[in-house]
Amino acid sequence: MEILVCVKRVPVPGVRFVLTEDEREIVTRNLGFTISPHEECAVEAAVQLVEQHGGSSTVLTMGEPAAVEQLRFAISMGVNEAVLIETDGGECDAAATTAAIVEAVRAEQSAGVPFDALLFGNESADAGNYQVGLGVAHALNLPCVVGIKALDVQADGSVVAKREIAEGWEVYELALPAVFTVKEGVNLPRYPLLRGRLAAKKKEIKTYPAQGPGEAGLEMMAFKNPQETASQVEVLGEGPGAAPRVAALLQEMGVL
């Protein structure tokens, strides 16, 4: 099997972003970067499929040259090849990202790498547009199952994909090639070993230049940080001496 898994470089969650004066960009010089949990599970799924059925896996991302960090992380997990669609660092909308990935996939196919399965995270950890996987499937005229939590290749070469719903499971059986968007929980991603990390540092990264956003591109107007809510902390005391005040507070709250 030939598997392509697409990931996106995003800031590590849980931090308050510093914005430029025009609020159109995030100041990234002090930020750490990662991929979303959905995409990490997609990388693990690609590695497992190759381990079980043979072939090779390729990880692809679109971004500035620093995004090779996320590609090398995927390689350290066991992915075989890596492709960077290099941009100038500016944010690309879903339409531009979709078009660039489709172009890269066709270039890889022309070079003799016909992908059997294209894996995406269900959504990116920043924009959360849910659009790129579907858009790539539409452009390549491939079937697509979104939000899967199980993926199994059958003896006849078909694939069974399962999606969890409120009433249980939806089960899809389809022929390859196909596109799948993966949700966190489909597997437990492995922790890269030292040997994998060392090998990832030496791996050559194939690079394609990104094209412009085209007429369908969206314009980002501004970022906004959520309003902070202040919290108050009262020290009730230290050691056993604080016990009466703690008891009084619990009585006031109705706990005692």
Image: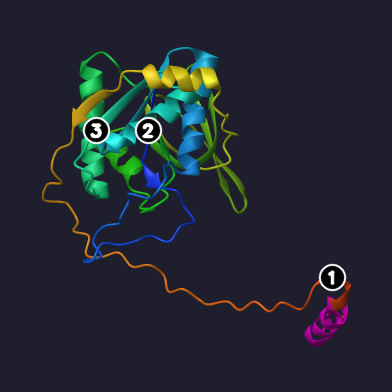
- Residue that mark 3 sits on: 85
Residue 80, disc: none
Looking at the rendered structure, the secondary structure element under dot 1 is helix
Q: Residues within 10 Å of mark 3 (few under 14, many from 20)?
A: many
Residue type marked 1: Gly
Quadrant occupied by the N terminus = top left
Does residue 83 lie above or below 80 as drawn? below
| Camera-side residue of 111 and 230 | 230
Residue 69, disc: 2
Residue 181 lies left or right of residue 252; in this view the side is left
Res. 203 in view: yes
- Residue that mark 1 sits on: 239
Q: CA distance from mark 3 to mark 2?
A: 13 Å
- Indicate the quadrant where residue 75 lies: top left
Residue type marked 3: Ile
> Magenta stretch?
242-255
Residue type marked 2: Glu
Q: CA distance from mark 3 to mark 1?
A: 59 Å
Looking at the rendered structure, the secondary structure element under dot 2 is helix
Does residue 230 lie above or below 29 as drawn? below
Label 3 vs label 1, nearer the camera: 1
Residue drawn 18% across the image and 59% down it: 219
Residue drawn 46% across the image and 19% down it: 198
- Indicate the quadrant where residue 86 lies: top left
Q: CA distance from mark 1 to mark 2?
A: 48 Å
Label 1 vs label 2, nearer the camera: 1
Looking at marks 3 and 2 on the same chain, the residue that comes earlier in the sequence is marked by 2
Res. 147 in view: no
